[in-house]
Amino acid sequence: MELFPKWRLPAKVAVALTLFFFIYTFLREVLHPFVVQKKNEFYRIPILVVNKVLPDVAITLLTLAYLPGVLASIVQLHRGTKYRRFPEWLNTWMLRRKQFGLLGFFMGAMHAIYSLSYPMRRSYRYKLLNWAYEQVQQQKENSWIEHDVWRMEIYVSLGILALAILAILAVASIPAVGNSLSWREFIFIQSKLGHVALFLSTAHALVFAWNKWVDVKQFIWYLPPTFMLVVLLPSVVLLCKVILMLPCFSKKIQKIRCGWESGKGMANRCVLTDL
């Protein structure tokens, strides 16, 4: 009779991340202009601030869905066997990967919806008129900026691709759909496509940053932008995944998951099952 017992840990982590990124973004985007420049930017909270929090939480939750698999592989390599239980915290984490991934997909979908609402905002229309007036005042016939156009085109394209693959992962997580797939098909979707989605999401954030990494104006109150924070962990996970795919590691992992133990032989070969 428990209420969503498997969702408690992921939900608590999602709420904690949401509060952290909201306060962090509020300090940079709203409080700093109010304190330093006496500008009232509180209108940004319902849409702009929230839409900066959502992708940060989404990519972090998605990373937390694939990080335990990498840690489990490292533990097995260190132990040289698959017959010893994982630590309790890692075992619990691995059993909650589906919930972390679905919450990440939910946050990503909300981010897409919020982004589509940008042109409907009254504040955006006012700013658009102000930009047009400033262009006329400066006697500019064309305000086209080539690199900024390319940045936005690539940024949006990567976001759409990442969300589409995450939608496939979410559908495959439905028990009725998952039960209709073979084990190899299920592993391919949840592991291979999942890491592709994580890569696209990370690239999406990196392209959004573009050349802002070297812009000192991005550091407000000595606080780096959130895109600099959220890409660190997924980059580490992807790098570890690439390293574990190297033949010197992947072959040993395959042998361990087939029953081989360090110091012992393996009489029969078996089918590999991925974490």
Image (tube, rainbow, N blue to C red):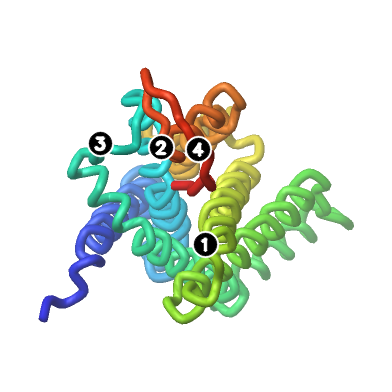
The amino acid type found where label 1 is placed reads: Trp
Does the CB distance between marks 1 and 4 fall below 8 Å?
A: no
Percent x, y for residue 68?
36, 43
Relative vertical location of residue 191 with respect to residue 106 in this rendering, above or below: above
Foreground: disc 3 or disc 2: 2
Relative vertical location of residue 199 with respect to residue 47 in this rendering, above or below: above
Does the CB distance between marks 2 and 4 fall below 8 Å?
A: yes
Q: Residue at 83% of width from left, 47% of height from top?
A: 146
Label whose residue precedes the other's in the sequence (1 or 3): 3
Does the CB distance between marks 3 and 2 fall below 8 Å?
A: no
Q: Secondary structure at mark 1?
A: helix
Within 10 Å of the Cα at label 4, are there few (<14), some (14-19), or many (20+) other Cα atoms? few
Q: Is residue 123 left or right of residue 145?
A: left
Residue at the right extreme, as displayed = 141
Percent x, y for residue 18?
31, 58
Foreground: disc 2 or disc 1: 2
Query: In this figure, which residue is indicated by the disc labeled 1?
Result: 183
The amino acid type found where label 2 is placed reads: Gly
Label whose residue precedes the other's in the sequence (3 or 2): 3
The amino acid type found where label 4 is placed reads: Asn
Give the CA distance from mark 1 to mark 4. 21 Å
Query: In this figure, which residue is indicated by the disc labeled 3?
Result: 84
Total labels: the figure holds: 4
Q: Is residue 194 left or right of residue 102?
A: right
Give the CA distance from mark 2 to mark 1. 18 Å
Query: In this figure, which residue is indicated by the disc labeled 4?
Result: 268
Query: What label does residue 259 carry, if any?
Result: 2
Residue at the left extreme, as displayed = 1
Give the CA distance from mark 2 to mark 4. 9 Å
Residue 255 visible somewhere in the drawing: yes
Foreground: disc 2 or disc 4: 4
Work out whether residue 275 or residue 16 is closer to the camera in this orientation and state it.
275
